[in-house]
Image (spheres, coloured by chain):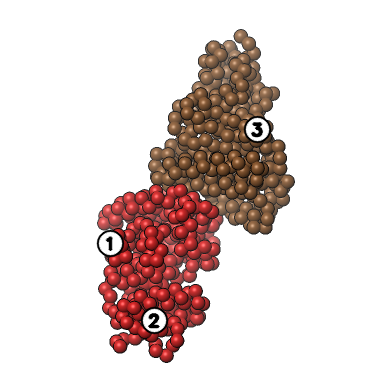
Chain colours: A brown, B red
């Protein structure tokens, strides 16, 4: 057997055109294509060791052994690599998360992307980035996009083989995000469950999907033109439409807290004063503000004045997976 | 000429199945039927005098002479009565509003219903309630419903003659509302403009209309059964769907403030503790909580603890128009 150890880092990504709902639960095939920005200051580092001395997978997150539910999810994911590489050993997985877990900051994106990249090395499969994004996808949809840096599209594809990530723009220009952690508690409802509920019950769901595909076309042109105002406007509207679709579910899904709205108000104020900045929210109360990286610290200070948040994170555009 | 003076009172109503968009702007024909509860503690009193000594209409609201925009709207409305009754005098209109104006508390509903009822007397037309609701509709859509007390349906109809209000239930049972005035400033965007923008640009609009018609059927059965939990559940979801449709507009329409969400959170808490109460929001940040009238004062006190609002109004089910 080849190498049995691999370690990698993957960065979080924030969707500007959202993914919310699967057409195939098992294969994680999304209802619509999505697009995100990979960030530099939120990431996960993961080591995978296929070890003949263990009788099951052991998954440590931030130094703590994880329960069977989490471990089983990792186990099923590593089976993809074991099956492909013909490995019949269990693994020890050690993961350090530099993203608050379960707070809508997409820790599963960096988590499964790092796990995929580490398992890729440990298994000796040596998949290329495209193939790796197909693997990552089966761990968690948003992980598909964290394989690459900068602006990344996840093509919904037509089948399990062509639903993968494509780099759109390396993000090496004056672009960044200010992330306001309104609440870092774990969510009441998982994204997985929330998506299902929305897809099955919201009268707006089909129009959401159509509208997201339109937004995607438009934002790709705006990214090509590095038109931050248009990128932001499309992203902000797309986020509202996703939350609108959730509010239409039965029972309704409301992820916002009072402070979520307060942050939106400050963003509106900043914009009226001439600073281009635009918010986007995922399945949680936190707010991510897209802006020029050169404006980010000033926006952060302004938020600290108007708002008593414990955590405001400034991030630039980040790279793709890195083998350590 | 007959009588030339009329005075009447009309009460506000809060829609449980919302009206948001017209299929005919001129005739105020709505896209969907709606349903409301008329309240007893929010109302408008209006006197109309057709006076040969004045050379134009004079409109006083709360003792203050109004600008030409407001006066013209009243003028055009009174023309309906003048034309029908063959009156060629202008009018002096004195209106006292016991509803905060423009704060999403539907002051135009009680306003135009009271004006219609007063003009009905002053003109000597003696229209019945159904006809009067057709007239009131042309002043302001929601005024259609304030002609009657209790639970009232506004049938969208097929033409200008059959789009009117119908009383559904007199509301003389243990039902009421707690109204939390989050902000009583005038709105940035009028309902008229907001509706148009939503109808023309929101990808969710058609599904909103379909969904509201379904909700209406279900809530009428729930009202017949006096099933407050089901009435509330349907109303709360319907309000979310209207706001979702607005959030889908281009540009998005967000009417909520941080305190709007705070009130929703308290309502969720109260419900978990066993008190049946359900919120509904209109085109503004204020929250109206449907509950048993016998629970209303307790809910009010709870809100006063968790929330620093200047104004919390308790209201029971109110009557229809009253000639004074």
Looking at the image, do the residues carrying marks 2 and 3 touch, with CB atoms under 8 Å apart?
no
Quadrant the C terminus of chain A occupies: top right
Looking at the image, do the residues carrying marks 3 and 1 touch, with CB atoms under 8 Å apart?
no
Q: How many marks?
A: 3
* Label 2 to label 3: alpha-carbon separation: 69 Å
Q: Residue at x 27, y 78 (%)?
A: B126
Q: Residue at x 31, y 72 (%)?
A: B132
* Observer able to see residue A182: no
Q: Nearer the viewer, residue B266 or B236?
A: B236
Q: Residue at x 68, y 55 (%)?
A: A274
Q: Nearer the viewer, residue A225 or A130?
A: A225
* Observer able to see residue B3: yes
Instruction: Label 2: state its secondary structure.
Output: strand
Height in image: B44 above or below A38? below
Q: Earlier in the sequence, mark 1 or mark 2?
A: 2
Q: Is residue A66 left or right of residue B283?
A: right
* Residue A39 falls in image quadrant: top right
Height in image: B188 above or below A194? below
Q: Nearer the viewer, mark 1 or mark 2?
A: 2
Q: Position of residue B46 (x, y in %)?
A: 40, 78
> For the view shown, which residue lies furthest in the top direction?
A1
Q: Mark 3 = which residue?
A: A149
> For the view shown, which residue lies furthest in the bottom direction?
B53
Q: Badge 1 local density, few (<14 within 10 Å), some, or many (20+)?
A: some
Q: The disc numbered 1 marks a residue on which chain? A: B
* Residue A100 falls in image quadrant: top right
Q: Mark 1 = which residue?
A: B168
Q: Residue at x 32, y 82 (%)?
A: B86
Q: Mark 2 = which residue?
A: B47
């Amino acid at each position: 057997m080849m190498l049995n150890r691999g370690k990698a880092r993957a960065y979080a990504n924030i969707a500007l055109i959202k993914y919310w709902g699967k057409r195939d639960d098992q294969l994680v095939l999304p209802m619509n294509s999505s697009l995100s920005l990979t960030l530099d200051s939120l990431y996960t580092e993961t080591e995978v060791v296929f070890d003949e001395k263990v009788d099951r997978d052991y998954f440590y997150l931030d130094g703590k052994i994880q329960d069977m539910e989490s471990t089983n999810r990792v186990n099923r994911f590593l089976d993809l690599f074991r099956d492909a590489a013909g490995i019949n050993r269990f693994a020890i997985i050690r993961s350090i998360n530099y993203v608050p877990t379960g707070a809508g900051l997409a820790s599963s994106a960096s988590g499964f992307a790092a796990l995929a990249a580490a398992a890729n090395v440990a298994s000796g499969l040596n998949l290329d980035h495209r193939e790796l994004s197909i693997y990552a996808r089966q761990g968690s949809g948003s992980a598909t996009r964290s394989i690459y840096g900068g602006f990344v599209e996840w093509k919904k594809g037509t089948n399990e083989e062509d639903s993968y990530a494509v780099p759109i723009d390396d993000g090496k220009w004056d672009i960044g995000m200010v992330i306001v952690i309104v609440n870092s508690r774990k969510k009441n409802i998982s994204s997985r469950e929330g998506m299902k509920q929305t897809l099955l019950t919201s009268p707006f769901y089909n129009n959401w999907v159509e509208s997201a595909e339109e937004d995607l076309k438009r934002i790709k042109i705006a990214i090509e033109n590095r038109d931050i105002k248009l990128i932001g406007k499309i992203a902000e509207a797309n986020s509202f439409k996703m939350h609108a679709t959730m509010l239409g579910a039965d029972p309704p899904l409301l992820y916002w807290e009072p402070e979520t709205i307060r942050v939106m108000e400050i963003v509106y104020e900043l914009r009226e004063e001439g600073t281009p900045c635009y918010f986007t929210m995922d399945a949680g109360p936190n707010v991510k503000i897209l802006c020029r990286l050169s404006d980010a610290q000033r926006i952060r200070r302004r938020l600290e004045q108007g708002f008593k948040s414990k955590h405001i994170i400034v991030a630039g555009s980040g790279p793709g997976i890195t083998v350590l």
